[in-house]
Image (spheres, rainbow, N blue to C red):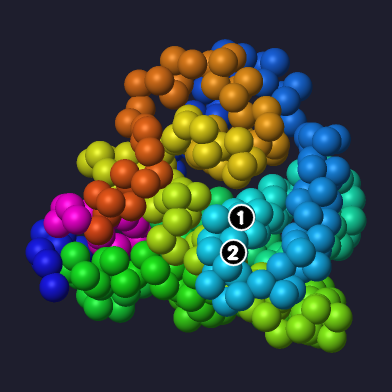
Amino acid sequence: MGQHVSRTDFEWVYTDQPHTSRRDAMLRKYPQIKKLFGPDPKFKYIVSAMVLTQILMLYVMQDQSWKMIVLVAYCFGGVINHSLMLANHEISHNMAFGYGRPLANRLFGMWCNLPIGVPMSVSFKKYHTLHHRYLADERLDPDVPSILEAKLFCNTFGKFVWVILQPLFYAIRPLFVNPLPVEKLEMLNTAIQLTFDGLVVLIFGWKMLAYLLIGSFLAMGIHPVAGHFIAEHYMYAKGFETYSYYGALNWITFNVGYHNEHHDFPAIPGSRLPELKKIAPEFYETMPQHTSWVRVMYDFVTDPAIGPYARIKRRALERAG
């Protein structure tokens, strides 16, 4: 089963998240940062091209063997679907049409959602807003593993299983940690997604729906692009709760690796986060950063000092007081 994790509790802190104070300091020193705010006009065309590529792949792959379907889903289709999930992350911050057109952003998110196979766009936006506003809050941040996860997946083999099952935990955890009422747009998102899935089965067959779903699942588990799930907030250096990665995989993940920059300025689209770092390098270059998402996952599984407990957490009552 492997080594047992050395931590038996989360890292509790009694200070507010660092992103708010750093944002204020950066804007005082570099007010030109505000010019980076707002959507990237190219974003919606890039995302639409990815959606259409996956629809084309349904035609290309429909007569392939199961072995080829799984292989292509892992190496190609799943990468696109994971990128579309991160496009939905951008859309949750209204980076498709701007803050003044929230409904247009939600509807575009549903379009972006189609190849993923499971309705998630509207629900993700609802819970991701809490993650930014209440980072590491024990009750409100759905990104922090539950105590049950930390206790169950507490050795090398358990952590390996946990990484494989990340898609399930990301989908189910918010419903237990802080369930929110279902919105009408979530029901619309579900109806549109199920209609699309039904059309895929009707036109291309069940294997092609499986191609989409297998790709989405595999690319969120043991997959190089999935390393950002762990890299973003798991405590690899004591006292630091958010980490950036500046490597090549940012090219296919809308620069989600620039994660300190993103939490400092969620109103800046991923395409402009490298420019933010160039404007204010002294705020980021001294902080711990990751150089490989694959290495992040390897260390998470094999290092007994890292696991689901390796997260900073804030007590809700102390923060309210």
Q: Nearer the viewer, residue 65 or 13?
A: 65
In the image, residue 185 lies at what x, y percent?
A: 81, 73
Secondary structure of the residue carrying numbered label 1: helix
Residue at the image position 32 percent from the left and 72 percent from the top: 161
Residue 183 in sight in this render: no
Residue 116 position (above or below residue 313) = below
Amino acid residing under circle 2:
Ala
Residue 290 in sight in this render: yes
Taking the magenta stretch, the answer to whether it contains residue 313 is yes
Binning the other alpha carbons within 10 Å of mark 1 as few (below 14), some (14 to 19) or many (20 upward) gives some
Residue at the image position 29 percent from the left and 66 percent from the top: 160
Quick check: 166 left or right of 274? left
In the image, residue 206 lies at what x, y percent?
A: 71, 85
Residue tagged 1 = 76
Residues under numbered marks 1 and 2 in contact, where contact means CB atoms less than 8 Å apart: yes
Residue 17 position (above or below residue 193) = above
In which quadrant is the N terminus drawn?
bottom left
Residue at the image position 67 percent from the left and 16 percent from the top: 31
Residue tagged 2 = 73
In the image, residue 270 lies at what x, y percent?
A: 65, 36
Amino acid residing under circle 1:
Phe
In which quadrant is the C terminus drawn?
bottom left
Q: For the magenta stretch, what is the residue range? A: 302-321
Secondary structure of the residue carrying numbered label 2: helix
